[in-house]
Amino acid sequence: MFEEKNTALGIEFGSTRIKAVLVDEENKVLAQGDHEWENHLENGIWTYPLDEVWTGLQDCYAKLKADVKEKYGVTLTRVGAIGFSAMMHGYLVFNDKDELLVPFRTWRNTITGDAAKELSEALSFNIPQRWSIAHYYQCILNKEPHVKDVSYFMTLACYVHYKMTGRKVAGVGEASGMFPIDSSTGNYDAGMLKKFNALAEKHGVTAKVEDLMPRVLNAGEDAGTLTPEGAKLLDPTGDLEAGIPLAPPEGDAGTGMVATNAVSVGTGNVSAGTSVFSMVVLEKPLSKPYEEIDMVTTPTGEAVAMVHCNNCTSDLNAWVNIFKEYSEAMGINASMNDIYGTLYNKALTEDADCGGVISFNYFGGEPVVGINEGRPMIVRKPDAKFTLANFMRSNLYGALGVLKIGNDILLKEEKVSIKSITGHGGFFKTKGVGQSVLAAALNAPITVMATAGEGGAWGMAVLANYCIRADKSMKLQQYLDEKVFAGQEKETLEPDPKMVAGFDAYIAEYKKVLKAEAVAAKEW
């Protein structure tokens, strides 16, 4: 029997899709809705117009509501709790009248290089270009006119939450993509706030940055309730009631951690699709900052080392499409699933080091290795063993090449211990193949779970449920272990030592040829 009070709703704004997932008190999916959207390049800035935020959200919710009606014969008027998530970072900035001062600048923009470099040096902490604080400081450096009028700035998830509740708050994981977090306090790092304010004051900006950012909350804390205005904004029909509790808004990194049960020390996850990123929960701080590694946190504030790469499966998919065209030209009617399965499994049949074939999958730039623009290409020596198996294995290795370079710093230089990594995303669709390649890249066991495919919206629904269902003394990890993932179907694959050695050899050659990628991007 469907009972509204026993549900939780998670909504996540992804880069190409807004998705809503309604779960029951045991976190099983009851209904879903989604809305496709795309970012716009306007005046050199990647953005989403705010009207598309609201029309997309309303369409997504309407589809979920229709799904509930069709499956259960119920008009949705209430849920037990709601949580909003979105792609992290970026810059939404407003004056004291809640007016947007400049178009939303998303995580995808690489226009904050000077700010990121100066802040990283001043704070002795790697500040990526994507982070909200880098965007704000770049505006200060650029002497943009709107800076004097800034009342607050925030991320997309925080903004949607604010419009729903009237509260300017951020889950700590989301906040960690705005400004560095001190894990011992679970708040913005006080020493770094002081240093930033001193830097800003040199440019004539006297506003304290901590007054401009959302207040930081831990998972499970009170983040407000749905106001009548918020209810109408989410469901313009007027069916949805106000007064529903909301979870602290989280970023897609945090919801990915929750969706893969990777929030405790020594665990991590890898999301591998169009882009790829890994997150590992650290036992202790790194010895020094690294440009290749972003430091964020779990939804409960533990330090997380993230390696974020802009490219993963796009070039793989392009090559598979070439083989699809070839099969059609030969009069062979093969499904895409069959072609993927055949090519991926063939990849693991020959040389563990790819026989001298190197693949760069860079559709876009890769800041981790200092490449600003992408040029996908295959490179090989004349005496390379150029076979179908080695070609495909090279493409699979290349999809994770930059990720491995970043994680080798953690594993080989910082000696970080990894107990388990959970993989999710399209890279793992062909059973065992992507999983074994990632295990070799990280030299760690890789687990794939049935629910990992539910994604961030489901993870946000779990966080919403945690707010209202967990005993206040129950930590998030305990809730996940006992109430969410107990008995969960999963498969773990140990790394093959031969593949580990082969991938290491491949990356050594990959680094040597990286200059060719840089030249191609610069000259062509």
Image (tube, helix red, strand yellow):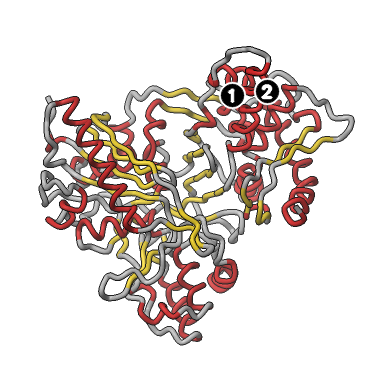
Q: Is residue 350 above or below residue 182?
A: above
Residue 326 badge: none
Horizontal arrangement in the rendering, residue 76 relative to residue 111 (left or right): left
Q: Is residue 293 above or below residue 346?
A: below
Q: CA distance from mark 2 to mark 1?
A: 9 Å
Q: Quadrant of residue 171?
A: bottom left
Horizontal arrangement in the rendering, residue 522 relative to residue 184 (left or right): right
Residue at 32% from the left image edge and 27% from the top image edge: 486
Residue at 59% from the left image edge and 26% from the top image edge: 436
**Residue 28 in view in this figure:** yes
Residue denoted by label 2: 347
Horizontal arrangement in the rendering, residue 229 relative to residue 251 (left or right): left
Residue type, numbered disc 2: Ala
Residue ranking furthest to the top: 332
Residue at 27% from the left image edge and 30% from the top image edge: 29
Q: Are marks 2 and 1 in contact (CB under 8 Å)?
A: yes
Residue at 84% from the left image edge and 29% from the top image edge: 384
Residue type, numbered disc 1: Val
Secondary element at tag 2:
helix
Q: Position of residue 368 (x, y in %)?
A: 63, 53
**Residue 477 in view in this figure:** no
Q: Quadrant of residue 162?
A: bottom left
- Closer to the chain start, of discs 2 and 1, is 2
Q: Quadrant of residue 4?
A: top left
Q: Position of residue 45 (x, y in %)?
A: 50, 62
Residue denoted by label 1: 433
